[in-house]
Amino acid sequence: MSAQRLTPGRFLAVLAAGGLFGFGLALSTMIRPEVVLSFLRLQDFGLMLVMGGAVMVTLLVYKLAPRLLGKPLLGDYFHQHVSQWNRDTAAGAALFGVGWGLCGVCPGPAIAGLGAGNWTLLWALGGMALGALVQGLRAKG
């Protein structure tokens, strides 16, 4: 979906979906780094149910939606994203995992946590932005 064709109806649908996603993250306590860290230390497996449920819903929708719908509700056609693994992808995934493991913060829950008033997450988001900037500069050069 391109920015030029973002109608008010599509904008409201995207806003509602983002709000629902943020609410789900808050309800599942994924916006609290201490909960995520206790999950990563294998002390609390509550987030396993949350992540497992999210994976199952995503798999079902990605497989069934193109078969059941002629086109997406808010788009022209279903996109295919073929990814290729290489050394840079593996290094980025490892760096992301280490950062997540050290601070217990993932980008989506960090933004949702800001909405819940957890302003200390700005430090983690600043680090993510800095990392994205460094990666972009590295990719250009």
Image (tube, rainbow, N blue to C red):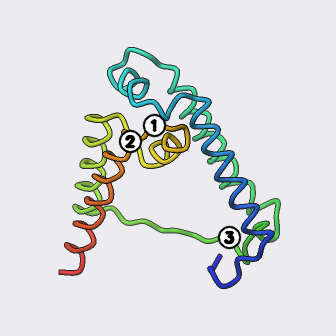
Say which amino acid is labelled 3. Phe
Q: CA distance from mark 1 to mark 2?
A: 6 Å
Q: In the image, is residue 64 above or below residue 88?
A: above
Q: Earlier in the sequence, mark 1 or mark 3?
A: 3
Residue drawn 62% across and 80% down? 3
x and y percentages locating residue 60 in the rendered image: 69, 47
Residue under label 1, please give it.
118
Secondary structure under the numbered disc 3 in the rendered image: loop
Q: In the image, is residue 80 above or below residue 113?
A: below
Secondary structure under the numbered disc 2 in the rendered image: helix
Point out the residue furthest to the bottom here: 4
Q: In the image, is residue 135 above or below residue 15?
A: below
Residue under label 2, please give it.
121
The reply to whether the C-beta atoms of the residues labelled 1 and 2 are less than 8 Å apart is yes
Q: CA distance from mark 1 to mark 3?
A: 36 Å
x and y percentages locating residue 109 in the rendered image: 49, 42
Q: Quadrant of residue 4?
A: bottom right
x and y percentages locating residue 55 in the rendered image: 57, 41
Q: Quadrant of the C terminus?
A: bottom left
Residue under label 3, please give it.
78
Foreground residue among 11 and 49: 11
Q: Residues within 10 Å of mark 3 (few under 14, many from 20)?
A: few
Secondary structure under the numbered disc 1 in the rendered image: loop
